[in-house]
Amino acid sequence: MWVNAMLESSYLPWRARQRIAHYLERTLYQQRPDWYQRLFVGKQATAKAVTQGPDHHFFGYYDKSPWSEDGQYLLAHCSQIGFSQPQAGDAVTIGMVALVSQQFIPLAQSYAWNYQQGAMLQWLPNAPTQLIFNDFVAGHFISRVIDIQGHAVAQYDTPVYALHPKLPLGYSLNFARLARLRPDYGYCGSDDPFADQMSPSEDGVFLLDMTANHSRLIISLAQLAQLNPLDSMSGAMHWVNHIQVSPKGDRIAFLHRWKIAGQAHQSRLYSAASDGSDLRCLLDTQMVSHYDWLNESQLMVWANTVDDTGCCYQLVDIYGQTQLAIDRSVFAGDGHCSFSPDRRWVLTDTYPDLYRKQELYVFEVTKPKQKQRLARLLSCDAARATIRCDLHPRWRQDGKQVCIDSSHDGTRQIYLLNLDQAG
């Protein structure tokens, strides 16, 4: 938009640009939000809330779609603890929003959740009226399947992180270890049995056979720590996070992370066959963040480049070869990126800027410089650190609508935006 060009122009004195930006971001945003919308976003449809306060409603992460197969319902969590870090014993209500009436329908409760990813709530593949989520029962994290009436269908002794799109398989990790090392993504209530081990041989990525209700370790932390070890791994705690299955289920990807107390964590991006074999390191640049599968052999990821020139969005293949790197002038910061159902478009967001504004973008894979801003929203001051409210944009199955979580109106709620151009 032209307003960005004006605020970045070297022809205007710095002080003048700052005064204009302050007026636009503070005064105009509050007093004339319609003008602000037109200036920064244009004529795009505004974000429309489908949940309301005072309770907080959210879906969770960007790598899952909350829409039911028939498009009538949207999976959601409902929290009454507001902007507070969930503690052991805090419950979240599992439910869905009936989109016609915009009514939240409670179905169950969970005691294994966080604000970043909820209870890993998701629709069960090949069972369009059933949903799965994690819970805490008798001192253990588990996963439960219920139908849209709230009736119990199944229960597994292992919590789920990601599901195979075709087979009755799930992938899991140690959520208690995450609670210690990355509390944004872990669950409170259970102790990490390997808390005193840097890279335990009995912890890592687990495969859940949902037919037999049996899980087994397929990739261990010890195995990952021993693969081309770096000096930064000496004395570091290791863990895995962000498991994602490829579109057809042939492979998985995940982040191997390690951290020395008091220092920032470092990361590698790995991929493996669905059974854990054929393990390959795709990126070993220490800074690797959000990603999504384009197809069975390519992923887009925000990471430092192989030649250590800085972070950017990159398209890499399962052999670790970079196919595309998007210039930092297009996107200067990390975001939660995901491909549209037809794989033509990329949806992503930004973290809050100096004015605490988060932005939502869509762009064609082959034309990133022609990105379109869909929204610019205030991040509530209370939603910071481990309880932050990222937009985490998700696609509807037909690519015509997207869903975000946002705190710009003072509570965490779910919003929809129409996106007709990305069909």
Image (cartoon, helix red, strand yellow):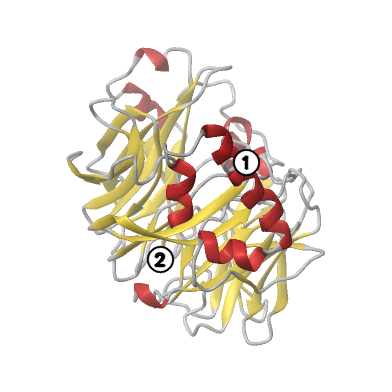
In this rendered view, identify the residue nearer to me: 233 or 289. 289
Quarter holding the N terminus?
A: bottom left
User: Going by the image, does 294 lie left or right of 207?
Assistant: left
In this rendered view, identify the residue nearer to me: 280 or 305. 305
- Residue under pointer 1: 19
The answer to which quarter of the image holds residue 254 is top left
Question: Residue at left 45%, top 24%?
Answer: 199
Quarter holding the C terminus?
A: bottom left
SS label for mark 1: helix
Marks 1 and 2, how far apart at CA = 57 Å
Question: Residue 266 at what x, y percent from top left?
Answer: 43, 26
User: Going by the image, does 191 lie left or right of 403?
Assistant: right
SS label for mark 2: loop
From where the camera sits, is residue 259 visible? yes
Question: Residue 100 at what x, y percent from top left?
Answer: 63, 87
Residue type highlighted by circle 1: Arg
User: Going by the image, does 10 lie left or right of 365?
Assistant: right
In this rendered view, identify the residue nearer to me: 58 or 147. 58
Instruction: Tell me the number on the disc at residue 168.
Output: 2
From where the camera sits, is residue 59 visible? no
